[in-house]
Amino acid sequence: MQFFVNINKANQVYHTAPTIDTVWYQIGKYAVRLESFDYGLPMGWASAGKDVRVRVFLENTLLPPFEALIWERRRPAWLPKQLTLNAWNAPLLQLMRERKWG
């Protein structure tokens, strides 16, 4: 089964959906904030709370939609040079698993 996603609507939901929960933590000297939000309900494919996603802020700057987890070996431009990919991904993945986000 294949789904087509309206990218404009997905971006709007990512930027405007109300925050459900917020977690703050530090990676080295950098402040990171995770905000969970209901993605599925405003997109029209899930009931409330069934498709909760997370948006990530680095030093209070919102990262690009759905790019916070780094699966490639290529370093994204927004990731500070002082942070390794593992130092970034490990706490993010742990918190997302603990809270059942994404």
Image (spheres, rainbow, N blue to C red):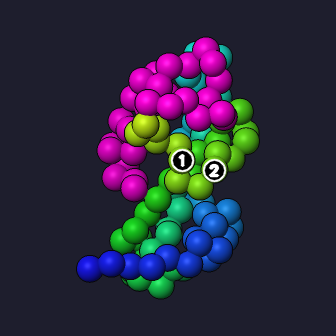
Image quadrant in which the C terminus is located = bottom left
Q: Quadrant of residue 81?
A: top right
What distance separates the C-alpha of mark 2 from that of mark 1?
A: 6 Å
Residue matched to label 2: 64
Residue at position x 40%, y 39% from top?
71
Q: Find out whether residue 97 is within the magenta segment.
A: yes
Residue 21 visible: no
Specify the amino acid type for callout 1: Glu
Quadrant for residue 92, please give it. Answer: top left
Report x, y in % for residue 55: 57, 52
Check whether the beta carbons of the residues at disc 2 and disc 1 lie within 8 A of each other.
yes
- Place of residue 29 in the rendered image (x, y in percent of width and height, measured from the top left): 65, 17
- Quarter containing the N terminus: bottom left
Q: Please tell me which residue lies in front, 73 or 67.
A: 73
Q: What's the residue at 39%, 29% (across, down)?
A: 90
Number of other residues with Cα within 10 Å of mark 1, as a class: few under 14, some 14 to 19, many 20 or more: few
Q: Viewer-proximal residue, 25 or 42?
A: 42
**Mark 1 highlights which residue?**
67
Q: Which mark is residue 1?
A: none
Q: Secondary structure at mark 2?
A: loop
Q: Which of the two residues, 49 or 93, is positioned nearer the viewer here?
A: 93
Q: Amino acid at mark 2?
A: Pro
Q: In this picture, which residue range is highlighted in magenta?
A: 73-102
Residue at horizontal 65 percent and vertical 74 percent from the top: 8
